[in-house]
Amino acid sequence: MTLASSPVSGKPAATSHWHRRMVSGPGRLFEPLLILAGLLAILFALVYPMVFILVGSFKAQGGLLASATAFTWANYITLFSGGFGRFLVNSLVICVAATALSTLVSVNAAYVFSRFRFRGKGLIFGSVLFGQMFPWIVLVNPLFILLTQAGFTNSYTGMIFCYTAISIPFSVYMLTGYLATVPRELDEAALIDGASRYQVVWRIVFPVLMPGIVSTATYAFMLCWTEYLFALAFLTKPAVQTLPIGLYQLFGDDRADWGAVMAASVITTIPTLLLFLPLQARLSAGLTAGAVK
């Protein structure tokens, strides 16, 4: 069978006919509905656990399936009367300090990797990223020996050191990629005007780099905030234990107080939400820019 050509596009007429049927037929309406249904299903899967936990934290027995219908603050009162606030304060101190230190080191390291050429640069940069390849369980034993010899077990200092070390590689990688998008002419103009390298980094590059810094700092904070393995191994004294350990202690040998568990889960989530939501726009911009090199 010979197909006549379209007078406009030059394509066979039969092909244009089937193309018009696919675009203007029932599939044109069905496809958006299918996409919308998929998005709603994903949204439900993401939101439902949080709603379940939030509502369950205000029920005496915990959980949406609990027989109690009245809402109460009893779970939160029980939680904080048992000393859960101590875990919250410990996590805030350790994670904020580790995030600040990690960001400080990463900005300087990323600037060096991005702006300078020196022998062994590729090897050193690869070595920084190489630390990310080990499963954390492998690092527990050597880090425990190191911290014990230094006298840093059961201390803020030891955990800040660990969390800074594990968050630096990804932060350096992201900030180096982001710095590649910042024109070098900014540095050169500042140097010509008499600024030192230190002034160039913190007065010229730092404001321009802010979206990337926000994204890496948010990642570092969330990484430290949810870390459990190192906290379990290095913090044996209740006075310095962090939130993940506090959550674990709510589970008994034969039963768990699900109301307290859900109240603790809500409290654990609030700081990350307070940090993430206001910075969401800058976080997206920083991740996108840092991914393009």
Image (cartoon, helix red, strand yellow):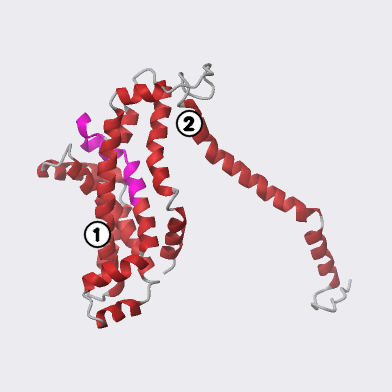
Q: Can residue 250 be seen in this snapshot?
A: no
Task: Say whether residue 154 is left or right of residue 137.
Answer: left
Q: Nearer the viewer, residue 241 or 85?
A: 85
Residue 67 picture location, percent across and down: 53, 16
Q: Residues within 10 Å of mark 2 (few under 14, many from 20)?
A: some
Q: Name the amino acid, label 1.
A: Val
Residue 107 picture location, percent across and down: 28, 63
Residue 237 within the segment the image draws in magenta: yes
Residue 137 picture location, percent across and down: 29, 42
Q: Nearer the viewer, residue 174 or 233?
A: 174
Disc 2 element:
helix
Residue 200 picture location, percent across and down: 26, 72
Quarter holding the C terminus? bottom left
Residue 201 occupies quadrant: bottom left
Q: Which mark is residue 127?
A: none
Q: Name the amino acid, label 2.
A: Leu
The residue at which mark 1 appears reads as 105
Q: Can residue 253 be seen in this snapshot?
A: yes
Magenta range is 220-241
Identity of the residue drawn at 40% across and 23% down: 75
Q: Main secondary structure of the magenta part?
A: helix
Residue 249 within the segment the image draws in magenta: no
Identity of the residue drawn at 38% across and 72% down: 182
Q: Is residue 190 above or below residue 123?
A: below
Q: Nearer the viewer, residue 4 or 274?
A: 274
